[in-house]
Amino acid sequence: MRGADRLVASLEEQGISHIFMNPGTTELELLRALEDRHQIEPVLVPQELVATAAADGYARFHGLGAVLLHLGPGFSNGAAFVHDAKHARSPMIVIVGEHPKAHLAVDAPLNTDLVAIMAPFCVALVVADHPRTVGLVTKHAGELARSLRGPVGIIAPQDVMASDGEGPSWPDRRDDEIGLAGRASQTMPAPAKPRDTVGSEGTEEERAPLALTAQQVGVNPVLLLGSSALNATGQRWARRIADHLGGRVYAEVFPALMERGRHVPFIPKLPYFPDQARTLIGKPTMVILVGAQEPIAYFAEEHRRPQLIEDQTPVVALVLPGAPAEATLANWAQSLGVADTEHGDDAIGRRTVPDATASDALATPRVQMQVVGDAVGVILEQRFTDGELSSRSHGSEPNKVGPAAAEGALTVETLGLIFARSLRSGDVVIDEGRTSSGPMFTHSGDAPPHWYVGHPGGAIGGGLGLALGAAIATQRRVRALVADGGALYSPQALWSMAHLGLDIGIVIAANGGYRILRMEMMARDIKPVATQLTTFEDPLIDYIALAAAFGVDGERATTADELAAALERRSREHRPFIVVAEIATEP
């Protein structure tokens, strides 16, 4: 059995059904193994950025994703969205082919220091250095990806993949070393703990007795929820706790995965802009992190500290980033005397997925919220009946905008309202609209139950790849709001969508340039002399022609009515499409 066969067999055993790939000559043995075994469906994409973003989108729903890339340059092409996957804490196996050792000994054109290139983007690296142990190495990589909650790299040398175990190892190893599961190294330390930690649901060494009383919390706490606390049950518990304590609850700026809709309390996100976030947080008696990291400004501000919470405010991690949060929230609520109205409109006890997934010792938030194939439809249809859709009485409510607001000018407000109204129960929503997506998030709080996918890593352009991976993982309808600048990073994803005939609708928020930079310029009083450096208007980019080149149909909307009509019409076609929503160019 060749090394490549062992690697693919191990992926199968770990439940991976699809692998996203942009391979080259060095990976031909792995391609042959995939064709021979037939249990994993290879998804060919024309560019590495698409492959890594799609594997991330797949992993957020399926629990473990996989991507296959070609040597150091291929990984470098896709590294930005491995970075995003790392910050989304997506369990992912990143397989990168490597030259045989004879080729590495000479100055070959594609030789790189693959370990040095991959290490900053992966939570761990393993080297498949002997054909007899490739299966163990691959299994170990999957375990690391789940336990460390992030992408793990496998360096797969061509000669090891081609060998049946009788030839030399890579590099030379004695026979008594063959039982070792490759050479592994963790490439990053564990996330820095906040100023205090209690009640964590992480590893044994992370767990501590729950000892957060109402007296300790004070009269004005803030709960900040990460993705592991943002399923429906977690949100309901958090809202009840916040109400009981007289506090507030927010989601992190760009949640990796969040259950949303009118069946759950409306929980706003922290704003992206630091001053807005600092103002919103204010001066609470305590900030309690539930599966979230302490919020940090994305970019440096002169004479300002990067932390968004004031130094004198106590910050406590109830649940460490990425660790399961639901049970801790339930236990904390019980200790505070918060009622569980199991049979009320706002019932807490129902789970989004079968309880069996929660028993995995290595489970991640994505595994707990696993929705593979048609199962997501069954789950959502069983759970979200009209009788269970409650009117919220907690916290901030979405803005109520009447039908007349959808008529006339196409602004970010009307764009958000129309997009939200187009959603159906069970949809997956990809948000990479950047400065144009705030109203969409607000209005979709009143939409039917759906999944929201954000971009916590901040690397621009991953929205189309995330949509591709999420559509394959869930077999559900996907709707993406993508900024026009971001849409140019990996439009090759459109080809894969068309090739597979996926039901993915993409709204491109087109304002003719980098609106975020214009907004930053205004905030820092930079004069309009630099405006020409932030616009794409001479010539205008023809996104419809670009999509057509990849086999995806599209149309343009210049008014709110045109956008609403386009989304309604396209919803009946069940194939990929784009709508270019031309909105105002001013911030």
Image: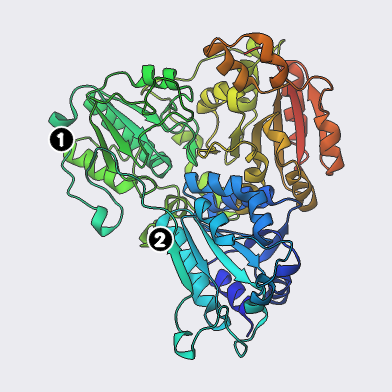
Question: What's the residue at 38%, 41% (across, down)?
Answer: 229
Q: Name the one closer to the observer, 390 or 104.
A: 104
Kindly identify the amino acid type of the residue bearing the numbered disc 1.
Thr
Element assignment for label 2: helix
Quadrant for the N terminus, please: bottom right
Kindly identify the residue that appears in the image at 51 percent across and 23 percent down. 442
Query: Residue at label 1?
Result: 213
- Sort mark 1 into few (<14), some (14-19) or many (20+) by Cα contacts within 10 Å: few
Q: Is residue 73 above or below residue 305?
A: below
Q: Position of residue 368 (x, y in %)?
A: 43, 53
Looking at the image, residue 377 sits to the left or right of residue 277; the answer is: right
| 163 versus 483 height, above or below | below
The disc at residue 71 is none
For the question of whether residue 562 can be seen, the reply is yes
- Residue 464 point in image, percent of width and height: 68, 41
Please indicate whether residue 11 sits to the left or right of residue 317 in the image. Answer: right
- Camera-side mark, 2 or 1: 1
Q: Residue at x 38, y 32 (%)?
A: 295
Res 356 label: 2
